Amino acid sequence: MIAVAIMVTVSVAMRWLINGSVPGDIELVQIGTAIAVFTFLPICQARRGNIMVDTFTTRLPRRLRATLDALWDLAYAGIAAVIAWRLGVGAWDTIRSNTVSMMLGLPTGWAIAACAVMAGFLAIVAMATALRISKGRES
């Protein structure tokens, strides 16, 4: 993300100073941001950093809340697995058809494949956090 931010800054400065820009800056931002987002999702889940709304469960017994949290983590794992699967299918099709970005001609399938791998890792991490909660190691 730092590299993307620097590239955006340079591109904006070039537009302002010399009426030019970094070639393909929009494509690079799209690919870099997608990979960064999918990389940070498992880290956030491992640290239990996702936003949780517990307005209706605050008064429930601690063990029941933990059970509900574990169930939601399992649901998140299932959704992440479906996303990983579909991204994997999309990556395979994109790589097989040699799809490239418009400006720079970058093969886009490999970025999609990287996102698929990270979504799969997110599913594993979400299952691990569900297990950790269900064993009472975290609330």
Image: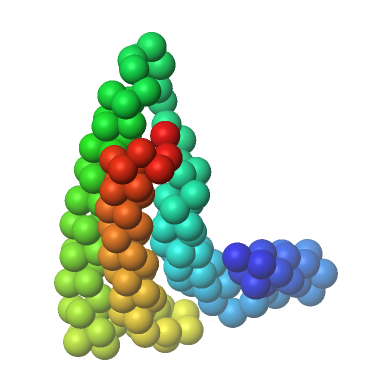
- Identity of the residue furthest to the top in this view: 59
Rendered residue at 46%/44% (across/down): 48
Q: Where is residue 18 in the image (x, y as percent from the top left)?
A: 79, 74
Q: Tell me: 50 left or right of 75.
A: right
Most foreground residue, 60 or 96: 60
Most foreground residue, 107 or 13: 107
**Is any part of residue 37 visible from this angle?**
no
Q: Position of residue 108 (x, y in %)?
A: 36, 78
Rendered residue at 60%/65% (across/down): 1
Most foreground residue, 105 or 126: 126
**Is any part of residue 51 visible from this angle?**
yes
Most foreground residue, 133 or 84: 133
Indicate whether 51 appears above or below 18: above
Q: Quadrant of the C terminus?
A: top left
Q: Position of residue 98 (x, y in %)?
A: 26, 87
* Quadrant of residue 9 within the rendered picture: bottom right
Q: Where is residue 15 in the image (x, y as percent from the top left)?
A: 73, 68
